[in-house]
Image (spheres, rainbow, N blue to C red):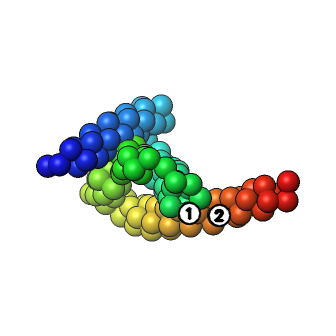
Amino acid sequence: MTRHEGKTVAAVAVGGGIGAVARYAAATWWPAAPDAFPWTTLVVNAAGCAAIGVLMVLVTEVRTVHPLVRPFLGTGVLGGFTTFSTYAVDIERLVRGGHARTGLAYLALTLIAALLAVWAAAWTTRRVAAARIGAGRRA
């Protein structure tokens, strides 16, 4: 492993720890009953996808940032915050508990919410950035 790769791995690891703690805190503050719709995980995943949409536009289209920003925030913090594994476990728990319709609704709603969140956040960030750049040129 090169020195640069080691720094990237460390940035992802530290960011991932921060994101995972934030996700755990959300689940602790807003727990879902075993047979209830897992709103916390859905909201965490949608919010994380929205943040990824903003981040990716900012670091790839708007600003030049340090090379470790994207691995730390994107892969690390937001990757640790969002959770496919809990999503899958929630679906299995609902289906095994006799709530197959709720599980399927959760499966579809999370997918739709995550895709819409990343798209809307990226679209909005591009518009805001373009407006600010345009305003800066006029000043």
Query: Looking at the figure, which quarter contains the C terminus?
Result: bottom right
**Location of residue 38 in the rendering, given as x and y in whole percent from the top left corner:** 44, 49
* Residue ID for mark 1: 61
Check the image and report above or below for 115 versus 23: below
For mark 2, what is the residue?
126
The percent position of residue 126, horizontal first and vertical second, equals 65, 64
Please indicate, yes or no, whether residue 45 appears anywhere in the rendered image: yes
Per the image, label 1 sits on a secondary structure element best described as helix
Give the residue displayed 21% in from the left and 44% down from the top.
3
Number of the front mark, 1 or 2: 1
Residue 56, how many percent across, how many down?
50, 59
- In the image, taking residue 77 as reference, residue 92 lies left or right, namely left
In the displayed structure image, the side of residue 66 where residue 53 appears, left or right = right
Q: Secondary structure at mark 2?
A: helix
Q: Amino acid at mark 1?
A: Glu
Q: Amino acid at mark 2?
A: Arg
Number of numbered tags placed on the structure image: 2
